Image: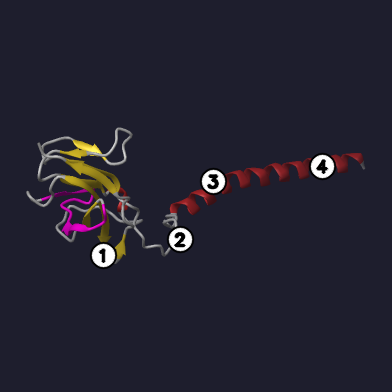
């Protein structure tokens, strides 16, 4: 009888090893099959969230050829010494989930710029279409701003989706 129980134990061990081997082969195949399907991409608000993220790095420049001063920097508010500063921000992060950049002509994102006095009186509200989907810039026409304190902000519209406004970027115009 002892031989039979050893044979039974041996067969059980072989069956167990075979089952584990089959599982070891099947598990990676199941994982690969599951990962072959793209995972759904959702914004913070869930799968139907159509709100675009806020544009980043608001900045201002004295002109199209001058360097930019970043809003909210520890050095203080930007100082503009020309009559036609350029306002800009990075839009790269505002593409809705699943959006693919194309080089074909088509509608670009609409960008709304608002410029107010420090007291809150609106000076300029301008909607432009960005030339690229990575950033937007608005060179103010000469004479729109006089010496004084101002603030500006922007938001992006892409089809039916709209971003929140950037925080206000305060700056000072002081021409010689």
Magenta stretch encompasses residue 135: yes
Q: Which label's residue is closer to the chain start, 2 or 3? A: 3
In depth, the one of 88 and 100 nearer the eye is 88
Which residue does the numbered mark 1 point to in the structure image? 159
Q: Tell me the CA gap for discs 2 and 3.
A: 30 Å
User: Is label 3 or label 4 in front?
Assistant: 3
Which residue is found at the position 29% from the left and 32% from the top?
75
Which residue does the numbered mark 2 point to in the structure image? 46
User: Is label 1 or label 3 in front?
Assistant: 1
Q: Position of residue 117 (x, y in %)?
A: 22, 52
Q: Position of residue 61 (x, y in %)?
A: 17, 40
Q: Position of residue 7 (x, y in %)?
A: 82, 41
Whether residue 147 is visible to the viewer of this picture, yes or no, is: yes
Q: Which label's residue is closer to the chain start, 2 or 1? A: 2
User: Is label 2 or label 4 in front?
Assistant: 2
Which label number is shown at residue 28? 3
Mark 3 closeness class: few <14, some 14–19, many ≥20 residues within 10 Å: few
Q: Tell me the CA gap for discs 2 and 4.
A: 54 Å
Identity of the residue furthest to the bottom in this view: 160
Q: In this view, does 164 lie to the left or right of 32?
A: left
What's the coloring here? secondary structure
Q: Where is residue 128 in the image (x, y as percent from the top left)?
A: 16, 58
Which residue does the numbered mark 4 point to in the structure image? 9
Q: Which label's residue is closer to the chain start, 1 or 3? A: 3
Quadrant containing the N terminus is: top right
Task: Confirm or deny contact between disc 1 and disc 3 (CB under 8 A).
Answer: no
Mark 4 closeness class: few <14, some 14–19, many ≥20 residues within 10 Å: few
Q: What stretch is highlighted in magenta?
A: 119-140
Q: Tell me the CA gap for discs 1 and 4.
A: 69 Å
SS at mark 4 in the image: helix
SS at mark 3 in the image: helix
């Amino acid at each position: 009888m002892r031989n039979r129980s050893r044979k039974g134990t041996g067969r059980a061990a072989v069956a167990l090893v075979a089952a584990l081997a089959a599982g070891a082969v099947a598990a990676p195949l199941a994982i690969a099959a599951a990962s072959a399907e793209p995972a759904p991409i959702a914004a913070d608000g869930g799968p139907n969230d159509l709100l675009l993220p806020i544009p980043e790095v608001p900045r201002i420049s004295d002109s199209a050829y001058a360097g930019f001063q970043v809003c909210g920097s520890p050095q203080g508010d930007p100082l503009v010494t020309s009559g036609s500063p350029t306002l800009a921000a990075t839009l790269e992060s505002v593409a809705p989930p699943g959006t693919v950049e194309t080089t074909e002509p088509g509608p670009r994102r609409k960008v709304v710029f608002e410029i107010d006095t420090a007291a809150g009186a609106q000076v300029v509200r301008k909607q432009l279409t960005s030339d690229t989907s990575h950033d937007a810039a608005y060179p103010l026409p000469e004479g729109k701003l006089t010496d004084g304190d101002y603030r500006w902000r922007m938001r992006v519209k892409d089809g039916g989706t709209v971003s929140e406004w950037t925080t206000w970027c305060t700056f000072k115009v002081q021409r010689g």
